[in-house]
Amino acid sequence: MQDLLEKIKLCSICKDHLPHGPKPVVSAHPSAKIVIIGQAPGTKVHVSGIPWDDASGKQLRKWLGVTDEEFYDETKFAIVPMGFCYPGKGKSGDLPPRPECAPQWHQKLLDFMPNIELVILIGMYSQKYYLKRKAKKTLTETVANYQDYLPIYFPLPHPSPRNRFWLARNPWFEKEVLPELKQKVKFLFP
């Protein structure tokens, strides 16, 4: 797996589309039991090189009910975004993850992680890619029907502070979904 991670770190297949150049951010280990598949690194993560090293990451760790140390333990959590590099700024936030990464690298990484028991799909890009036709029409519907995708997949909205309005409009998420997510994580890492 180390050779594969080194290849990914040197990847430049979409360099012509990246305003800040390639700097893949990924974390994986053969012992990992949970893989988190988000969108793509933001500007802060692009600079630090540490996955989820921003306000969204703090919120995600709260949702999971884990400490920073637990979250960054590669033997527990693999962090494999849909796009490994910062895609650049769009009109209303970051651009979508580059489409080259997932087909190029995801299955190769997952093949090295036979102990994965839970795949957390954050945002619509990962949900559409992994759930395919089983994804509902909207992210809200997919997340509301999270039990349809268990025991393997657990769809979530993005934990960005920008999603505070979504969270306010969907109080069932914090009341019903997050307790089950925390329980599943706790079961895998008592």
Image: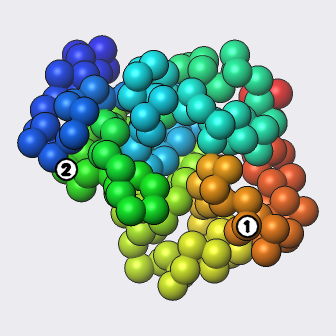
Q: Work out whether 2 lies above or below 171.
A: above
Kindly identify which residue carries mark 1: 165
Q: Give the residue displayed 57% in from the left and 73% down from the top.
A: 139
Badge 2 crowding class, 10 Å Cα cut-off, few under 14, some 14 to 19, many 20 or more, is few
Tell me the distance, in whole angstroms, between the alpha carbons under discs 1 and 2.
31 Å
Q: Earlier in the sequence, mark 1 or mark 2?
A: 2
Camera sees residue 185: no
Give the residue at the far right of this rendering.
175
Nearest to viewer (mark 1 / mark 2): 1
Can you give x and y, in whole percent of width and height, for residue 154 in the image?
62, 57
Query: Foreground residue, 91 or 68?
Result: 91
Numbered disc 1: secondary structure: helix
On the rendered structure, is 155 left or right of 109?
A: right
On the rendered structure, is 40 left or right of 169?
A: left
Split into 4 quadrants, where in the image is the N terminus? top left
Can you give x and y, in whole percent of width and height, for residue 64 in the image?
74, 40
The colour mode here is rainbow
Numbered disc 2: secondary structure: loop
Can you give x and y, in whole percent of width and height, for residue 114 in the image?
45, 34
Whether residues under marks 1 and 2 lie with C-beta atoms below 8 angstroms apart, the answer is no
Can you give x and y, in whole percent of width and height, for residue 80 in the image?
42, 38
Q: Give the residue displayed 44% in from the left and 39% down from the top.
A: 42
Q: Give the residue displayed 70% in from the left and 21% down from the top.
A: 68
Q: Give the residue displayed 70% in from the left and 34% down from the top.
A: 58
Image mark for residue 100 = 2
The amino acid type of the residue labelled 2 equals Glu
On the rendered structure, is 139 left or right of 85?
A: right
